[in-house]
Amino acid sequence: MFFFDPLYFLLIAPAILLSIIAQVWVQSAYSKYRNVPNMRGFSGAEAAAYMLRAKGVMDVNIEMTNGFLSDHYDPRDKTLRLSPDVYQGRSIAAVGIACHEAGHALQHAYGYAPLKLRTALVPITMIGTNLAWPLLFIGFIFHAMSLIKLGVLFFSGAVLFQLVTLPVEFNASARALAAIRETGLLTMEELSGAKQVLTAAALTYVAAAVTAIMQLLYFLLRAGLLGGDND
């Protein structure tokens, strides 16, 4: 129903364009720097371990996981999981991405509040996202305002998660770049390449947040909760 509404396309089209730009930029930056070896010969796993030791964090496991750019830090068991290209790779991109994930481990170790909030929101967001779309769909079909409002409430939780993710990701990149510079993991020229990769990746999170906000705005307008109508 939503996808055939001109208003939906009007609001979502810019966000979709931003998402496409972000993905193209990420692929371009990663493709460029995944083939450029770093001068010190660090693999991504070695760089992350070096960075964590330099910051006094000694209780984080680092292991390889399947997938392409599936890198993430799991605060539940203090484990850094790096994709094969990053774990084994000795490129500028591998070091930058691995250190970004190590930045999340530092956030956890130092009690960074936005990370705590995002972690707490994960189960709520998963439930809310699964319930929001069916509630909104049924609510709009049957003009059931109570279901629409409940769906909007659940979807708002997903939007909040996307917004909280932004400072978490930006801060992790800032920690990574600062640590790389302080420890000399990369030269200044190489650091510029790592920054390009991380900046491109950050744009994907911005695009996801913008998309979620525009979808929420659409639901609010169509429900008449922002002065629109629910026809």
Image (cartoon, rainbow, N blue to C red):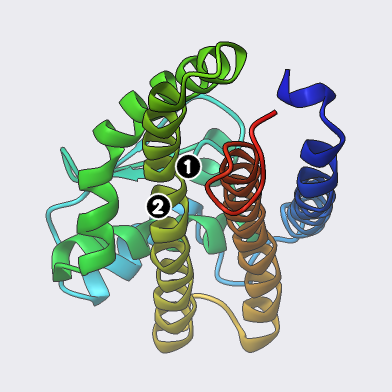
Q: Which mark is first along the chain, 2 or 1?
A: 1
The residue shown at (40%, 88%) is 182
Measure how far apart labels 1 and 2 are at the Cα level. 23 Å
Quadrant housing the N terminus: top right
> For this rendering, which residue is in front, 81 or 188?
81
Residue occupied by mark 2: 160
Snapshot quadrant of residue 153: top left
Residue pictured at 65% horizontal, 43% vertical: 218
Disc 1 residue type (three-letter):
Asp
Position of residue 43 measured from the top left corner of the image (x, y, whole percent): 50, 53
Q: Position of residue 76 (x, y in %)?
A: 16, 39
Task: Locate residue 57, reporting x and y percent.
Answer: 16, 65
| Residue in the foreground of this view, choosing between 219 and 121 | 219
Which of these two is toward me, 108 or 177? Answer: 108
For label 1, the crowd category at 10 Å Cα-Cα, with few meaning under 14, some 14 to 19 and many 20 or more, is: many
Instruction: Say which amino acid is labelled 2.
Output: Leu
Q: Secondary structure at mark 2?
A: helix
Where, by quadrant of the figure, is residue 91 drawn? bottom right
Q: Is residue 90 visible?
A: no
Q: Is residue 55 above or below residue 67?
A: below
| Quadrant into which the C terminus falls | top right
Q: Is residue 204 visible?
A: yes
Q: Name which quarter of the figure residue 150 lies in.
A: top left
Q: Residues within 10 Å of mark 2 (few under 14, many from 20)?
A: some
Report the side of 129 relative to 212 (left or right): left
